Image (cartoon, coloured by chain):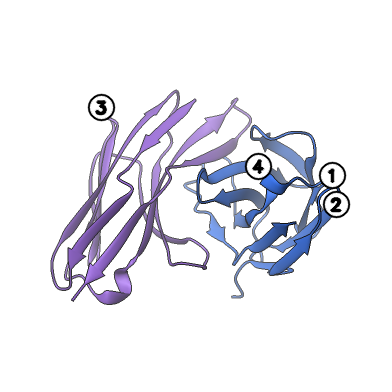
Chain colours: A purple, B blue
Amino acid sequence: GQNIDQPTEMTATEGAIVQINCTYQTSGFNGLFWYQQHAGEAPTFLSYNVLDGLEEKGRFSSFLSRSKGYSYLLLKELQMKDSASYLCAVRDEYSGAGSYQLTFGKGTKLSVIP
Amino acid sequence: KAGVTQTPRYLIKTRGQQVTLSCSPISGHRSVSWYQQTPGQGLQFLFEYFSETQRNKGNFPGRFSGRQFSNSRSEMNVSTLELGDSALYLCASSLAGRGSTDTQYFGPGTRLTVL
């Protein structure tokens, strides 16, 4: 089974840097995803980590430590439009059937203030 | 390339009724997964279809079912609706090659309200 924890809410100032943490416990691991979801909209893919280390994509970076069951999403130069929920999701292999199941955390609601 | 589409976008039903939701994946994507999203529980996995076969299933009662057609389009059905079924139902598609580093892309969702 899976257990994924992330903070419920965070507030940060426009132009600042914010780090959203995610810890997980899993019986199998085949990658960790971060999604962004604006209110009333679908989740959109941000990043994917399967090996330890940092993946950078413009203003967004994601880090993974498999031994610690830990990931974070780093958002730099915050903009008002970054106000959204950020979802951490872990993928494992289902029963060796070749199907990968995504289990999501409950999301972190980020509010960016002027 | 067109994204994942879902119909209808909004639906209001009463308890005891049944409902069918539709999802068209991104062209070339063969896997379709369904999720239920509620404020209290977040995103919860319902099931996944690949090549017209259910390949994976979450912990939902048998009232929730689905199917996939040969063109990869998928439908989800909920019978005997309960108030607690009110949620945003999201569909996601991926290439789903075995051993691939697949990414799931989500549709806009169907907002179901059960009265």
Residue wearing tag 4: B46
* Residue for point 74% across, 65% down: B11
Q: Residue B85: horizontal and vertical position, in percent?
A: 69, 48
Please give the residue where the numbered disc 1 appears in the rendered image: B80
Q: Label 4 near label 1: C-beta < 8 Å?
A: no
* Amino acid identity at mark 1: Thr
Closer-to-camera residue (B49/A70): A70
Residue B22, image x and y in percent? Answer: 76, 61
Residue A109 horizontal side relative to residue B72, left or right:
left
How much space separates mark 2 and mark 3, taking CA atoms?
45 Å
State the residue lying farthest toward the front. Answer: B115
Q: Nearer the viewer, residue B9 or B71?
A: B9
Element marked by disc 1: loop
Instruction: Name the residue beneath numbered marker 2.
Output: B18
Where disc 3 sits, the SS reads loop
Instruction: Please check whether the numbered discs 2 and 1 fall on a single chain.
Output: yes
Which comes before the other along the chain, label 1 or label 4?
A: 4
Mark 2 in CB contact with mark 1 (< 8 angstroms): yes
Residue in the image at 70% along x and 68% along y: B10
Q: Name the chain letter of the residue that bears numbered label 3.
A: A
Question: Marks 4 and 3: CB-CB under 8 Å?
Answer: no
Q: Amino acid at mark 4?
A: Leu
Question: Foreground mark, 4 or 3?
Answer: 4
Which mark, residue A67?
3
